Image: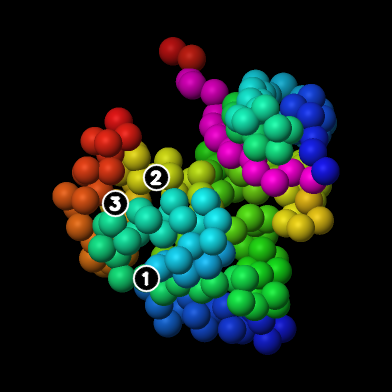
């Protein structure tokens, strides 16, 4: 097993919610990463952001790991949940709230409802 | 390097011959597309599994700096059950 894979497994196991993204949660550097970081920030989710632009091995490694060709990628409790389109759909449908509830991840339900109101 | 909507549809069609495929060029620049794929084979699969198989059909065109497709917003689903 490669070092990169070990590193990714450790990261997603030791943090309940991890977003692999371009840029950081404070300063996303791609519109798709920005959208998902924005949702998590707004919902007050405590998550770890990994900037793939800072590490080429991780940038490629995370795509191989998930068998998923794009960034961002969201992981909850060690499981790959989806990329930008899936997370957007799940946010609007309420499935993301359900997943966080099941996974014992704290989030602001009112904020999630506001996102849905604004995009309903 | 940009791709045409037809090229994208052809690649998906090759793997999903009976699917309903809708491709939209979001900005008219040949670089930002949205694709909706509705196929019976998606029944019982979650979105990650469905979209992974569509990405596989695109054979590396989405692959970052070497990819020809910069942005493809994907929506996948199984056809509505007929009552």
Q: Earlier in the sequence, mark 3 or mark 1?
A: 1
Q: Is A76 in front, or is A112?
A: A112
Report the disc number at residue A35.
none
Instruction: Please give the chain letter of the residue carrying mark 3.
Output: A
Q: Closer to the observer: label 1 or label 2?
A: 1
Measure how far apart labels 3 and 2 are at the Cα level.
9 Å
Q: Which residue is the site of mark 3? A: A98
User: Gap between marks 1 and 2, in whole Å?
Assistant: 17 Å
Tell which residue pokes out farthest to the top in this image: B83
Q: Please tell me in which quadrant of the rendered image residue B27 appears.
A: top right
Q: Give the image quarter of residue A93.
A: top left
Seen in the picture, residue A12 relative to B54 is either above or below; the reply is: below
Viewer-nearest of discs 3 and 1: 1
- Mark 3: give few (<14), some (14-19) or many (20+) Cα within 10 Å: some
Residue density around tag 2, few if under 14, some if 14–19, many if 20 or more, within 10 Å:
some
**Residue A18 shows up from this direction:** no
Magenta-drawn stretch contains B37: no
The answer to if B72 sits in the magenta stretch is yes
Q: Which residues are magenta?
A: B68-81
User: For numbered disc 1, what is the local secondary structure?
Assistant: loop
The quadrant of the image that shows the C terminus of chain A is: top left
Give the CA distance from mark 3 to mark 1: 17 Å
- Chain of the residue that carries numbered disc 1 in the rendered image: A
Viewer-closest of A96 and B33: B33
Q: Quadrant of the N terminus of chain A?
A: bottom right
| Mark closer to the chain start, 1 or 2 | 1
Q: Residue A47 — which label?
A: 1
Picture residue at 54% right of the left edge, 72% below the top: A51
Q: Which residue is mark 2?
A: A90
Q: Are marks 1 and 2 on the same chain?
A: yes
Tell me the residue at 52%/51% (across/down): A31
A27 sits left or right of A73 in the view = left
């Amino acid at each position: 097993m490669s070092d990169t894979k070990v590193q990714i497994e450790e990261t997603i196991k030791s943090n309940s919610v991890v977003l692999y993204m371009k840029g950081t949660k404070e300063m996303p550097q791609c519109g798709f990463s920005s959208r998902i970081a924005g949702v998590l920030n707004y919902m007050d989710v405590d998550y770890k952001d990994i900037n793939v632009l800072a590490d080429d091995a991780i940038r490629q490694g995370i795509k191989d790991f998930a068998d998923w060709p794009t960034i961002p990628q969201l992981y909850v409790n060690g499981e790959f949940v989806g990329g930008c389109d899936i997370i957007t759909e799940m946010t609007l449908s309420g499935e993301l709230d359900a997943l966080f509830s099941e996974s014992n991840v704290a989030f602001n339900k009112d904020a999630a409802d506001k996102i849905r109101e604004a995009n309903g | 390097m940009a791709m045409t909507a037809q090229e994208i549809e052809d690649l998906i069609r090759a793997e999903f011959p009976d699917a309903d495929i809708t491709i939209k060029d979001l900005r008219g620049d040949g670089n930002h597309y949205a694709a909706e794929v509705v196929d019976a084979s998606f029944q019982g699969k979650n979105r990650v599994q469905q979209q992974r198989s569509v990405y596989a059909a695109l054979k590396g065109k989405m692959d970052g700096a070497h990819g020809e497709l910069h942005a493809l917003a994907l929506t996948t689903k199984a056809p509505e059950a007929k009552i």
